[in-house]
Amino acid sequence: MEAIPVRIVTRGFGETSRRDSWWVTPVAIFVGLGLFVVYATWAAFQNAHYAYGSYLSPFYAPEIWGDSPHAWFGPKPDWWPSLAPFSPALLILPFPGLFRFTCYYYRGAYYKSFWADPPACAVGEPRKTYWGENSFPLIFQNIHRYFMYVAVIFLFLLAYDVWLATHFTNPQTGAEEFGIGLGTVILAVNVVLLSSYTLGCHVARHLLGGLFDEISKHPVCDKAYSCSSALNSRHQLFAWCSLFSVAGSDIYIRLLSMGIISDVRFF
Amino acid sequence: MATATFKIWRTHSSAPGDGTYQTFQTEVSEGMVVLDVVHSIQAQQAPDLAVRWNCKAGKCGSCSAEINGNPRLMCMTRMSQLNLSEPVTIEPMRTFPPIKDLVTDVSWNFRVKKGIKKFKPRQPDAPDGTWRMAQRDVDRVQEFRKCIECFLCQDVCHVLRDHNKHDEFIGPRFFVYAANLEMNPLDTEDRVDDLKDAHNIGYCNITKCCTKVCPEHIHITDNAIIPLKERVVSRHYDPVTRLLRMFK
Ligand code: SF4
Ligand code: SF4
Ligand code: FES
Ligand code: FES
């Protein structure tokens, strides 16, 4: 680009003149994301207590094969290798997992908290070499849009699960009836938060209208772009809220199924 | 009036890193900004203290420095924002070569700017040689035009600051500049290939430090860098759009 090299002195790991508690946010993110990953992995391998009546945990939705009545194609297929662990969650969780892993917000957050690249703004780094997202392996982050497409399909499937969660069996008559329980509300809030997160995705914002320089010539895209931008400006907030709501929904249904708590029926 | 302690970086030569802190005690009052303190120390205790400034209104972008380790404009940092019970450190930006004391050589930025393709408007829309633009389309790039070229974002960006990629990476300020041109409704130039190959936008790992320090509150990462990255993805990394382009 230019001939004159810029010579500066770089700092060692953790070196900074900052006086504020710069480490608090990265540590909090490390703990928050770490706990989520550990819980989600544990929950995915359980293959039990993921459904209760008409409720289905979002970690296990859609249930392609499995033992609950929610399964699309019945129980575990015969051709499944006997040595491989089986759980309906393991079949689908990689998609939302990789969607979040390649999300621009989470990328920026875990590069700091888990990889110290940088540990915090204006704080020295542990490594001298740097490739960024310019070459292998992180260049693969650029496939984020494909996970976004899948995530949008999941939104419809999860919304359908909320509809199913309004169906209850009357213990006296055995007939099916419409109702709303706390579980229905939790699953519905979860879908709203997931939609706010997914539709505010930077890729969605780009594809819905960000790619046009004269968006006024595309009125429908213009509207969509404005909505997506509004969600996008709170992308970090929705990233966390939806993370909590997914884990929270799973915990609620797990506790119901284990008989530790009982569901609240509003009507 | 209260007395506060300031540790100001004094250079011994223009070799990078060759300097020490000098401690000054001075009277401060509410409403003073760091630049006032530097000026009063300059007037009363250290007449050879070098500092660059111009407007004292946060608009010229000259007085960038690192105050208690945070990249900030000296003229926009009030005493009330600082903990005066401890010494306050004032250092030059460390991503640029030092000239003297708080003054750094930011000329690298101007050389980088020359490497970005210029604005190339389409043919005029009207016979009198003028253009028509919808306000809606102008709004988007308007944000980028607020930049005062303080280079605080360049200073904090770890790709430059910790990895010294000045020869390969243009830095957040110039992604804002490139976005301003690239998303301009009149512009016909194409900078997407350059952004990927010559300007190495892929080095940015979207950690948003640039956005945090920008005194003009430009959403550098969300509104300039990521949308540009997405344009690069559409052209170079997305197999489907590549395929579609082959058939066009
Ligand atoms: S977001 Fe990108 S350009 Fe901004 S400071 Fe971080 S790495 Fe640098
Ligand atoms: S983008 Fe903001 S921080 Fe960067 S040079 Fe412009 S005004 Fe300064
Ligand atoms: S950028 Fe966060 S979901 Fe796409
Ligand atoms: S003196 Fe102009 S921005 Fe501070």
Image (cartoon, coloured by chain):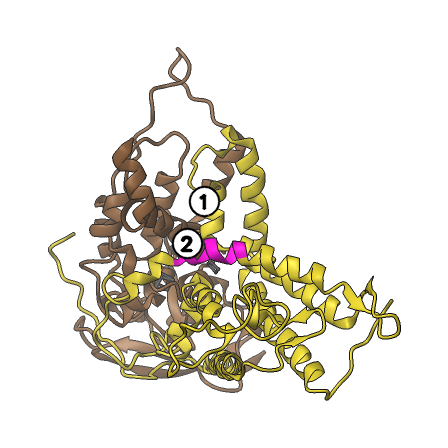
Chain colours: A yellow, B brown
Magenta-highlighted stretch: main secondary structure?
A: helix
Q: Amino acid at mark 2?
A: Arg
Answer yes or no: do the residues labelled 1 and 2 have beta carbons within 8 Å? yes
- Please tell me in which quadrant of the rendered image residue B17 appears: bottom left
In this picture, is A224 found above or below A130?
above
Q: Nearer the viewer, residue B160 or B22?
A: B160
- Magenta residues (range): A144-153
Q: Position of residue A84 (x, y in %)?
A: 39, 80
Which chain hosts label 1? A
- Mark 1 lies on a secondary structure that is helix
Tell me the crowding category of disc 1: few under 14, some 14 to 19, or many 20 or more residues within 10 angstroms, Cα based.
some
Please report whichever mark, 1 or 2, sits nearer to the chain's N-terminal start.
2
Q: Position of residue B116 (x, y in %)?
A: 25, 44
Q: Position of residue A157 (x, y in %)?
A: 59, 58
Q: Does A19 lie within the magenta span? A: no
Q: Nearer the viewer, residue A252 or B190?
A: A252
In this picture, is A152 found above or below A26?
above
* Residue lying at 56% horizontally and 42% vertically, measured from the top left: A224
Q: Which mark is residue A145?
A: 2
- Mark 2 lies on a secondary structure that is helix
Disc 2 C-beta below 8 A from ligand 3: no
Question: Is residue A120 shown left or right of residue A54?
Answer: left
In this picture, is B215 found above or below B190?
below
